Image (cartoon, rainbow, N blue to C red):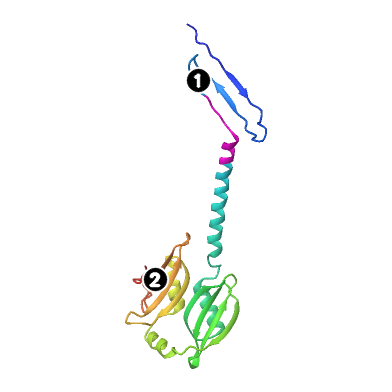
Amino acid sequence: MKRNIVIAVVTAAALVGGGTATALAVAGDDDDTTPVTRTDDDRDDRGEDRSDDRDGDADDGAVRAAAPGGVTAAEAITAALKHTPGTAVSAELDDGSWEIDVLAEGDTWHTVRIAPDSGKVLGAQKDDEDDAAEVRAALKGASVTAEEAAKAAAAKGTVVSVELDDDGDDKGWEAETRASGGDEQDWSVDLKTASVTPDRDDD
């Protein structure tokens, strides 16, 4: 017996209000049909998928926007010390600028703000800190500066802060890095060898 092949194509006009167009194709033997239906809902779903992709790109942009500009922590420290000579004790990316704490001669403290995109000095002010003696004692015999500690920690990620930890027996530099995905990690940098190890106090 010859096989009968029936091909029917039905195109429905857009429904009033819904705007749904349906195409139905039937092919095969007398008792074998395979319907294929496409609706506006399918197109809406694909539109939502593209929208989700765009939202993901926007989130990535937000992460990049939150990351430091072209000026590294080490470069910010160098710029701050050129403006205010002394010993850099900490550097932190805060409120859109680098803030560098400098212990100058006469045990006076200064905070120098550096632009993260240009390295220019945005401002400087004298602070009323009174722990100069403790800081100098902690740095006695140290051979690694804050700038060098920042450079060492940069091998682990983008450095967003570095500061002197002068508490207890394990004195050293503490550095915080940010990965490209936004994850942050704390590190300890040895005052004499500049070796970088995970901070044991980091949760």
Count of numbered labels shown in the rendering: 2
Badge 1 vs badge 2, beta-carbon distance below 8 Å: no
Residue 183 percent location from the top left of the image:
44, 62
Residue pointed to by mark 1: 33
> Which region shows up in magenta?
35-45
- Residue at the extreme bottom of the image, as rendered: 106
Q: Is residue 125 above or below residue 61?
A: below
Residue drawn at 54 percent across, 56 percent down: 59
Give x and y (percent) for residue 6.
55, 15
Label placed on residue 187: 2
Give the image location of residue 15, x and y in percent.
65, 31
Left or right side of 142 for 96 = right
Q: Secondary structure at mark 1?
A: loop
What residue is shown at x 41% (from left), y 91% (from top)? 133
What residue sits 60% from the left and 81% below the top? 123
24 or 15: nearer the viewer: 15
The magenta stretch spans residue 44: yes
Q: Is residue 73 magenta?
A: no
